[in-house]
């Protein structure tokens, strides 16, 4: 009999290790995410049968993840918080969370709550793999320029769900070399991080735009940065970028960029 799959979204490593170990000892298969963005990706790809979710995440409020999931799934969601239920009860009901557990967390209490959803009566419907876009971009290729390994993995998971082929570069200089060595029209979009070692995204964009090729002038280059001030947006445009996406990347905004710049095959 397969083990029930649980997705645990928690950014504190010690708490995550303890709870993950306790749940695995109790016979559950546990996947962990440590951020809002990673939680969205794991939920979309792991098909969990239940989620345990901390509200205070480094890149956003956990209720935003619940709202995303509720747009396509009724999977049970348990909120984990250091605050009393009274402070979050109205919001928890609004986003349709199924349960609420306060910290400090005791193994017996956690297992009692989980079993009420997973071990009694009919099994809940797991999250079905979620296609982030109804459009199939198979045959299209983009270059993702990002020095952070985790950010690259998350972006590849998200974008890859649309059928796009993704090449990666770990800094601006790497990106310039990959574009210069590719054939004309090889890449349809470049997603460019700004703050990177060796060569930042601004300089990489300027060097790519200076390449003597017909496709370069019209190739969309999208800035990705945690800095979303108007000055940063202006600097991105001046460097030759077409658009600016603030980090953490909003999935809807990213899908909008792909829709804008890619023509899906008929």
Image (spheres, rainbow, N blue to C red):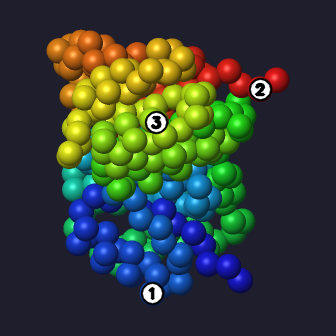
Q: Is residue 219 visible?
A: no
**Place of residue 176 in the rendered image (x, y in percent of width and height, measured from the top left):** 37, 37
- Marks 2 & 1, CB-CB < 8 Å contact: no
- Looking at the rendering, in which quadrant would you find the N terminus? bottom right
Furthest-right residue in this view? 266
The Cα–Cα distance between marks 2 and 1, rounded to whole angstroms, is 48 Å
Res. 179 mark:
3
Classify mark 3: helix, strand or loop: helix
**Along the line of sight, which residue is nearer the eye, 90 or 67?**
67
- Residue at disc 1, secondary structure: helix
**Relative to residue 13, is residue 69 depicted above or below?**
above
Front residue of this view, candidates 115 and 167 = 167
Q: Residues within 10 Å of mark 1 (few under 14, many from 20)?
A: few
- Which residue position holds label 1? 25
Residue 211 position, x and y percent, is 41, 24
Count of marks placed on residues = 3
The answer to whether the residue labelled 1 contacts the one labelled 3, judged by CB atoms less than 8 Å apart, is: no
- Res 123 visible: yes
As measured in the structure, the alpha-carbon distance from the residue carrying label 2 to the one carrying label 3 is 24 Å
Q: Secondary structure at mark 2?
A: loop
Q: Position of residue 172 (x, y in %)?
A: 30, 39
Residue in the image at 58% along x and 34% along y: 183
Which residue matches tag 2?
265
Query: Which of pointers 2 and 1 indicates the residue nearer the eye?
Result: 2
Distance from disc 1 to disc 3, alpha carbons, whole Å, reads 49 Å
- Circle 3: is it few (<14), some (14-19), or many (20+) Cα within 10 Å? some
Per the rendering, the mark at residue 141 is none
Dot 2 surroundings within 10 Å: few (below 14), some, or many (20 or more)? few
> Could you tell me if the residues under marks 2 and 3 are in contact, i.e. CB atoms within 8 Å?
no
Q: Quadrant of residue 241?
A: top left
Looking at the image, tell me whether mark 2 or mark 1 is earlier in sequence order.
Answer: 1
């Amino acid at each position: 009999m397969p083990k029930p799959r649980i997705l645990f979204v928690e950014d504190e490593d010690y708490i995550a290790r303890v709870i993950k170990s306790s749940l695995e000892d109790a016979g559950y298969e546990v996947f962990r995410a440590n951020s809002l963005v990673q939680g969205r990706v794991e939920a979309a790809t792991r098909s969990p049968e239940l989620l345990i979710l901390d509200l205070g995440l480094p890149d956003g409020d956990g209720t935003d993840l619940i709202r995303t999931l509720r747009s396509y799934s009724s999977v049970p969601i348990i909120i984990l918080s250091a605050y009393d239920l009274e402070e979050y009860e109205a919001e928890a009901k609004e986003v349709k969370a199924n349960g609420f557990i306060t910290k400090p967390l005791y193994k017996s209490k956690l297992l009692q709550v989980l079993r009420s959803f997973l071990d009694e009566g009919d099994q809940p419907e797991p999250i079905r793999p979620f296609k982030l876009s109804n459009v199939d971009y198979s045959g299209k290729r983009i270059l993702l320029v990002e020095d952070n390994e985790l950010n690259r993995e998350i972006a590849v998971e998200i974008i890859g769900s649309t059928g796009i082929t993704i090449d990666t570069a770990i800094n601006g200089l790497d990106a310039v070399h990959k574009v210069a060595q590719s054939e004309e029209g090889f890449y349809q979009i470049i997603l460019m991080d700004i703050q990177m070692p060796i060569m930042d995204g601004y300089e990489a964009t300027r060097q790519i735009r200076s390449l003597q090729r017909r496709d370069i002038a019209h190739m969309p280059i999208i800035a990705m940065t945690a800095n979303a001030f108007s000055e940063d947006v202006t600097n991105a445009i001046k460097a030759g970028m077409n658009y600016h996406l603030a980090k953490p990347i909003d999935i809807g905004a990213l899908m909008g960029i792909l829709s804008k710049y890619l023509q899906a095959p008929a």
